[in-house]
Amino acid sequence: RYSYDSSRTQQVIQIFLIDANGIVNHPDAGFQPGVGLYDPAVALTPPTTSAQNLMPAFSPDGNQLAYIRRIDTSHMGLYVMPVAGNITAFPITSTEQKEALQPYAKSSLIVEGQYVSQPVWSPDGKQVAYISYDNNEFNIWLANVQVDAKTGAYSLKGNPVPLTSGGVDAESRLAWTN
């Protein structure tokens, strides 16, 4: 979601989870995101102007979130974080909002580059494919992601594997097939 800070000069870009049941069961028919006082969305990333969090991709089991963070003006990173459970209650309380934001502190940088985009999880949830800009062209890469059973920290297992060589359209939408 895109908004502005209180000074109206800095963009705030956050990732939200919207509960479909909260929309359907709301007493006022015709809910429209961003309109009115009612909002069934719960923030998964904090409202800050120092980090832009984009392109969320939930793992197949819904327990992890891969996303892109703009690190600075010339670097982006692919991050993975856990997703808090039971955060789509209706109505959403301030306690639930805080609980939904807690896993963000456990976000792990998996890969970074000048331009990284379009993360998509493998069906088994062990890999993330993404597009990266290297050597003046866009290509598809594959990152093997592992989680430390003791700490819950995510990390890159081995090195990213290039899946293409010669360039792809940076606006491509990646998808897994059987």
Image: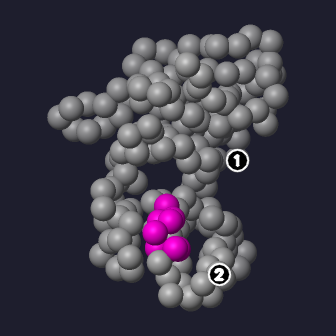
Residue that badge 1 annotates:
73
Q: Quadrant of the N terminus?
A: bottom right
Q: Is residue 34 visible?
A: no
Could you classify mark 2 by the number of other residues whose Cα lies within 10 Å: few (under 14), some (14-19), or many (20 or more)?
few
| Residue 148 point in image, percent of width and height | 26, 30
Give the answer, above or below, for where 140 lies relative to 92.
above
Is 61 left or right of 149, judged from the image as shown? right
Which sits in the foreground, 52 or 15? Answer: 15
Between label 1 and label 2, give the one nearer the viewer.
2
What amino acid is labelled 2 in the image? Gly
Where, by quadrant of the figure, is residue 108 drawn?
top left
Q: Quadrant of the C terminus?
A: top right
Q: Earlier in the sequence, mark 1 or mark 2?
A: 2
The span picked out in magenta is 17-24
Residue that badge 2 annotates:
30
| Residue 124 point in image, percent of width and height | 41, 26
